[in-house]
Image (cartoon, rainbow, N blue to C red):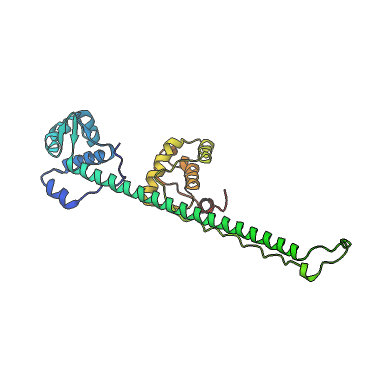
Amino acid sequence: MADVDLWMPLYIGDYMSGTSRLTTEQHGAYLLLIMDYWKNGALPDNDAILAQITRLPPDAWSMHRAVLEHFFTVENGEWKHKRIEREMDAARDKKQKASEKAKAAAQARWEKEAGQQAKHEQSNEQCSKHATSNAQAMHEECPSPSPSPSPLQTPGPSQDIAPSAPRAGKQRKPKRATQLPEDFEPSENNRQVAAEQGVSIHDQLPQFRDYHRAKGSTMKDWHAALNTWLRNAKKFDGGRTGKPPQETPHERGQRMARERGIIQ
């Protein structure tokens, strides 16, 4: 399968200028061919498979083959399309750059947080050393009298040490909604939910990915969103459809609470 995005660019002006002499049926067949090409790569030079891709009976395909073949280069048992190959290369390059940018941003955030944590630990260590040093100095300046006083004796004002105020804990920033990560994989909890619901995680995961990437959805907790999808999968065509589950108001409220981490 070609490693490109789900959407395929279609330049209307270029398409219309190059296909002005096609019939309506040939237009439909040609679009089906280039869409299959975008999804699966070069087409096999096999009339039975090409007829199946274009949804044409074998006799109709044999009539249109010569016209449609004109848009491709047939070599080494495959139909190649130069324009689609260029667009696929550009899409892969764009996807790679986006992935590298996301990794660099994540690395920068990690390094910043690690630096802040190290600085915080160093500050705590310095405060501890300073407190120990002050206590030792006060002990040397105010030695115990000899003989030692009774345990009931109240220490003098110079011996009072006011307790330091507790340090305020660092508040965590609320988790932000993000798009579905490229390397998203189901958790063990997702697999347990799929087993409980009697649906296949292997069948549902590609549909879940395709649907949310096509819509550009953003979530705070993608594993919680996948659990919601799995719990509603059987309601739609026995769990085989790629459409999003339709929720009741109660189910929607439960899903939003899970995604925000309010409930599990």
Q: Where is residue 21 in the image (x, y as percent from the top left)?
A: 10, 45
One can see residue 156 in this view: yes
x%, y% of residue 111? 46, 52
Q: Residue furthest left?
A: 21
x%, y% of residue 89?
24, 43
Count of marks placed on residues: 0
| Quadrant placement of the N terminus | top left
From this viewpoint, is residue 241 visible? no
Q: Is residue 109 left or right of residue 67?
A: right
- The residue lying at 54 percent from left, 52 percent from top is 261
For the residue pair 77 and 50, the one nearer the viewer reads as 77
Q: In this view, does 99 lie to the left or right of 16?
A: right
> Which x, y percent locates residue 146?
86, 62
> Who's the residue at 67% across and 65% down the image?
165
Q: Residue at x 43, y 39 (%)?
A: 204
Work out whether residue 178 or residue 59 is closer to the camera in this orientation and state it: 178
Q: Is residue 100 above or below residue 152?
A: above
Q: Nearer the viewer, residue 64 or 96?
A: 96
